[in-house]
Amino acid sequence: MIPMVDLKKQFQEIKDEVFSVLTEILESSQYILGPKVSEFEKKIADYHGVREAIGVASGTDALHLSIEALGIGEGDEVITTPFTFFATVEAILYTGATPVFADIEPDTLNIDVSQIEAKITEKTKAVLPVHLFGHPSDMEGIQKIAEKYNLKVIEDCAQAFGAAINGKRLGSFGDAGCFSFYPSKNLGGYGDGGMIILNDSMVADTIRKLRNHGSKGSYRHESVGFNSRLDELQAGILLVKLKHIDEYNRKRRQNAALYNELLSGKVKCPVEKDGAYHVYHQYTIMSERRDEIQKRLKGNGVSSVIYYPVPLHLQEALNFLGYKNGDLPVAEKAAREVLSLPIYPELEESAIVKIAEIIRDTV
Ligand SMILES: Cc1ncc(COP(=O)(O)O)c(C=O)c1O
C-alpha cells in the first residue's frame, strides 16, 4: 500500500526531539500562550522577514481573524478563487462579507489575475488569493490591481509554507498571510493550529485581541472576540518541525522532479512558473482519463485524492450566491480532471517509479 501521507514515518525520525519538548512543556505546566508560542511566533516572523506573527487555533481562524481585523464585514465583497478548500470561503462568510469568484489559470490552477478586474464593484474590499498545492499565485499582478482599486490582500498560504517568488516567501506580500498547521500540511502539527503573519502592528494588535476574547489580558475586554489560540504543545511540536521544513520541502521538490520526468507527455504535470519556488503540498496531475487512472492506482494499492471534485461556486452550501454550471469553466474543467498523487517527503523513489508506471500503462 502507498498512502497519500505517512506521518508515522516522519514522527519516528523526530520522536526524541518531540518527546523532549513535550516533556519540557508538560513539566512547566504552562499550556496556553506560554513561551513556546512566543518563540514559535518570533521564528515564523523571522523566517518570512515580517514584523508580526500571531498563532491561532487553525488556518480557518487565521483567515477569519485577518479578514475581520482588516475591517472587512457585512456589505463588503472579497474576490477569491472557486478552486480551493471550502474553509477559504467559510472564513469570508463568517465576517458577514460576500465571496465573489474569479476563474482560475489552467496551468497553476490559482486565481487568474486577468479575471479579477471584471469582478470589482464599489463593494469590493479585498482580494484573497490561495497559493494552491504550494504554487504561488501571481502576487505582482494581484498587488497591481489592489493598489489601483485600494483593496486589501489576504494570502491563503495554508498549502504553501516555505514557497516563494524570487526568494520572497509567500505570506509576506499581502496585508496578511495565513497559514494552517493541520497535520498533513507541509509544516503540520499533531492537531489543529494556524498563524497570521503581517507587518502592520495595529492590525496585529487587533488580531491578538480577537484571538483572546477581545482582551489583552487582566480580564479587561475591549471588544467581543473569540477563543482562538495556538496551544503551547502544538507550538513546541512545530518548533521541532520548523527546523526540518526546508529539507521536507526540498524532498517534495525532488519527488516532483522525478514524477515530471516519468509522466510528462502522458498526463498534464504541474508547472513551476519563472521565479516561483513550488513546495508541492500536492503533486496534482490533470487528465481527461482521471477516473480510470484513479481506479487503476487503487487496484494496485496506491492512494490518490481528487482535490477538489466540486468547485466552490457549485457547492450546495453556496447555492445562495447564485452561481451556475458554466460560470467558471476553467475551475469546472479542473474539478473534472485533477488527481493528486502521493508526494510526501519520506516517499521512496521506487514508489514514485511504480506509480508512474501504473499511470503510463493506463493512458
Ligand atoms: C487552502 C486552505 N485554506 C484553508 C485551510 C484551513 O486550514 P485549517 O484546516 O487549519 O483550518 C486549508 C486546510 O485545511 C486549506 O487547504
Image (tube, rainbow, N blue to C red):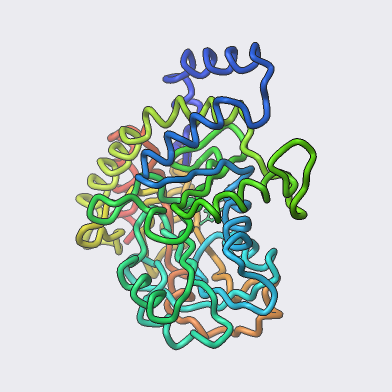
Looking at this view, is 273 or 5 the one in front? 273
Looking at this view, is 172 or 336 the one in front? 172
Q: What residue occupies the far right of the structure in this picture?
A: 219
On the image, the x and y values in percent for residue 164 come to 30, 52
Q: Name the side, left or right, on which 9 lies relative to 285.
A: right
Residue beneath the point at 61% across and 59% down:
69
Q: How many marks?
A: 0
Position above or below: 343 against 243: below
Looking at this view, is 186 or 142 the one in front? 142
> Where does the C terminus fall, quadrant-wise?
bottom left
Residue beneath the point at 34% across and 65% down:
139
Quarter where residue 322 is shown: bottom right
Looking at this view, is 116 or 270 the one in front? 116
On the image, the x and y values in percent for residue 184 come to 51, 40
Does residue 295 appear in this view?
no
Position above or below: 60 against 138: above
Residue beneath the point at 48% across and 55% down:
200
On the image, the x and y values in percent for residue 117 come to 42, 84
On the image, the x and y values in percent for residue 45 come to 42, 41
Does residue 217 appear in this view?
yes
Position above or below: 321 against 89: below
Q: Name the side, left or right, on which 137 lies relative to 73.
A: left
Quarter where residue 194 is shown: top right
